Amino acid sequence: MEEKKKHKLFEKLKDQYRLIIYNDTTFQSVWSMKLSRLKVFTVTSLLSAIIVVLVILLIATTGLREYIPGYPKAEYRQILVHNALKVDSLESELAKRDEFFKGIKAIVSGEIPEDNLEINEDIESSEIEFQEFNHDSVFQDKLLAEQLSLSIQNNDNQTPGLSQMHFFVPLKGVVSNHFDSRADHFGVDLVSDPNAMISAVLQGTVIFSGWTLETGYVIYIQHSSDLISAYKHNAELLKNSGDKVKAGEAIAIIGNTGELSSGSHLHFELWYNGNALNPEEYIDF
């Protein structure tokens, strides 16, 4: 029975019909065409598919796609791409800054900075190319530079390059304790009036501003020529990490904070390439 029903349905699809157009006045046949249900279904499906494809191409290749709900405009897409590039660059710069601060903190604390260079052990010696290099010429240039630097210095005990810097006095007061590296006292102690302002000795960037158990409120400033200045035992800090400061700008207030402090004073230090300097050789307190 089911096969007969299927056969009858197929036959119905193949049944022929005639579409005739008559003249409404004379009733004369003007145009006629033979049709079947299968043919009408096939033609209709093809036309629908063609119309759908044309509409999709029209929307995808023209500006009409911007009118689709949820589709971003061209300006928004450019902004998104631009912001994505900015975020990627910022992540790279932040990673470099963090590595730099990590190395600075290691130098200040007397540790050896970690070497972040990655060595590829899979490289064979045959792949390495060596080039000739005139070491004598480099040595002569370095020797000439050292001679010029030494001739400029007024004091042979000072670090090359720092003697030409003009240091601003961090605090107007009296030196109560001098620099003594043998006693692990890597700076000078200055006593002044209560609530006296402490100033930056040079222009630079604050690399640390916060609290430590032994030295209380501390602020470190990175200057040019690999120079770092430290200000310890403050009562209050006026600058945050990352702030740019100018020479003579107020950065803290004198205080008596930290376990190593025995009175209101400023403990001031100068560090150059990881080595402690005697501030009294560079600053007239």
Image (spheres, rainbow, N blue to C red):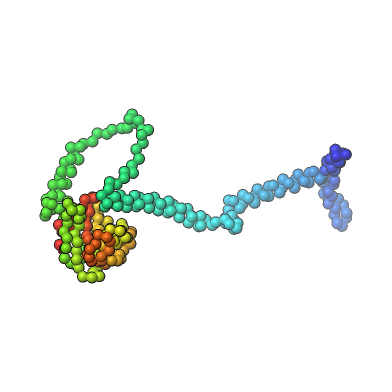
For residue 92, side relative to residue 189 (left or right): right
For residue 73, side relative to residue 234 (left or right): right
Residue 78 drawn at (x, y percent): 48, 55
Is residue 242 visible in this depiction of the protein? yes
Residue at 32% from the left image edge and 32% from the top image edge: 128
Is residue 244 visible in this depiction of the protein? no
Residue 145 drawn at (x, y percent): 16, 46
For residue 170, side relative to residue 24 (left or right): left
The quadrant of the rendering that contains the N terminus is top right
Residue 227 drawn at (x, y percent): 23, 54
Residue at 16% from the left image edge and 63% from the top image edge: 176
> Can you tell which quarter of the image residue 236 is in?
bottom left
**Compared with residue 284, is residue 99 higher up or lower down, i.e. above or below?**
above
How many numbered callouts? 0
Residue most toward the top? 126
Residue 121 drawn at (x, y percent): 36, 34
Residue at 58% from the left image edge and 57% from the top image edge: 70
* Of 83 and 102, the residue lying toward us: 102
